[in-house]
């Protein structure tokens, strides 16, 4: 019998500042992500998107400001236990020496959370959710780039997350496979009900899946709104950012 779908959780970032070796990377970030929302943080490489994700999931501590998960500070005692969060890394971070099934079930096996027979059932369910039924015995080296991304997503789903963070989920993928991964993100929101935060410089992905988009530039948020709001906004810097980043600036 399938496991109960995840619940979702809100995320709030308040006045977030972070510097590395004296160089400011995040400069007073403020944003609110609603429960069950697909919230896309879009911007060019080096704008601070991944650093922001690492703060949200608790891998980095801010110099100033705070991150609230379900209304609780992310670094407060017990918050990470009360709110299940998973991150899908840009590289996928699969272990090449393990099979697909072993990669997906690794967390459950390492923490001895379920017997092997139950782990196998959970792994099969999560692979089915991302359209990779029956690939448990394959190795990462035998998979395409898009399949590896979906295996990484399946591994994140094993903990039944309330919040899923995706770091550049379509990087190094051809356009067709990028569409497939985007469709998976939307489908998983419907099946798991988890809140999703997606960091990307892929304009097509961002506009295609987002409920709302935050546009980042040099460590700051330029604008937050629906895809329609972003397209209609007349701020010259914002419009140049949207078009120039993707080589679409009209010089006429």
Image (cartoon, rainbow, N blue to C red):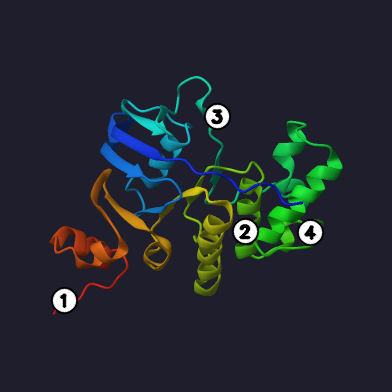
Sooner in the amino-acid sequence: mark 1 or mark 2: 2
Residue 82 is labelled as: 3
The quadrant holding residue 243 is: bottom left
- Please say whether residue 99 is visible from this viewpoint: no
Sooner in the amino-acid sequence: mark 3 or mark 1: 3
Sooner in the amino-acid sequence: mark 4 or mark 1: 4
* Image coords of residue 93 (percent x, y): 61, 47
Please name which of the two marks, 2 or 4, marks the residue nearer to the observer: 2
Please name which of the two marks, 1 or 2, marks the residue nearer to the observer: 2
- Marks 2 and 3 sit apart, C-alpha to C-alpha, by 26 Å
- Marks 3 and 1 sit apart, C-alpha to C-alpha, by 52 Å
- Marks 1 and 2 sit apart, C-alpha to C-alpha, by 39 Å
Q: Quadrant of the C terminus?
A: bottom left
CB-based contact (under 8 Å), mark 2 and mark 4: no
Please name which of the two marks, 4 or 3, marks the residue nearer to the observer: 3
Sooner in the amino-acid sequence: mark 2 or mark 3: 3
Left or right side of 113 for 41: left
- Marks 4 and 3 sit apart, C-alpha to C-alpha, by 34 Å
Sooner in the amino-acid sequence: mark 2 or mark 4: 4
Question: Mark 2 = which residue?
Answer: 150
Residue 34 to residue 28: above or below: below
Report crowding for label 3: few under 14, some 14 to 19, many 20 or more residues within 10 A (C-alpha): few
Residue 223 to residue 230: above or below: above
Residue 219 to residue 70: above or below: below
- Marks 4 and 1 sit apart, C-alpha to C-alpha, by 50 Å
Please name which of the two marks, 3 or 1, marks the residue nearer to the observer: 3
């Amino acid at each position: 019998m399938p496991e109960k779908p995840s619940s979702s959780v809100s995320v709030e970032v308040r006045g977030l500042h972070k510097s590395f070796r004296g160089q400011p990377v995040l400069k007073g970030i403020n944003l609110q992500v609603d429960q069950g929302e697909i919230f896309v943080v879009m911007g060019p490489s080096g704008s601070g998107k991944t650093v922001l994700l690492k703060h949200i999931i608790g891998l980095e501590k801010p110099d100033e400001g705070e991150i609230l998960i379900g209304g609780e500070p992310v670094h407060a005692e017990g918050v990470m236990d009360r709110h299940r969060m998973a991150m899908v890394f840009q590289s996928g971070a699969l272990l090449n020496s393990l099979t697909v099934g072993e990669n997906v079930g690794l967390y459950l096996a390492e923490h001895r959370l379920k017997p092997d027979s139950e782990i196998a059932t959970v792994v099969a369910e999560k692979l089915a959710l991302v359209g990779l039924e029956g690939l448990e015995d394959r190795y990462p080296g035998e998979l395409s780039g898009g399949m590896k991304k979906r295996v990484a997503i399946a591994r994140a789903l094993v903990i039944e997350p309330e919040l899923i963070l995706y770091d550049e989920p379509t990087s190094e993928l051809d356009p067709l496979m990028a569409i497939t991964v985007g469709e998976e993100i939307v489908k998983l929101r419907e099946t798991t009900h988890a809140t999703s935060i997606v960091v990307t410089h892929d304009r097509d992905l961002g506009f295609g899946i987002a409920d709302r988009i935050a546009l980042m530039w040099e460590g700051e948020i330029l604008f937050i709104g629906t895809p329609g709001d972003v397209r209609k906004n007349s701020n010259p810097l914002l419009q140049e950012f949207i078009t120039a980043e993707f080589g679409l600036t009209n010089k006429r």
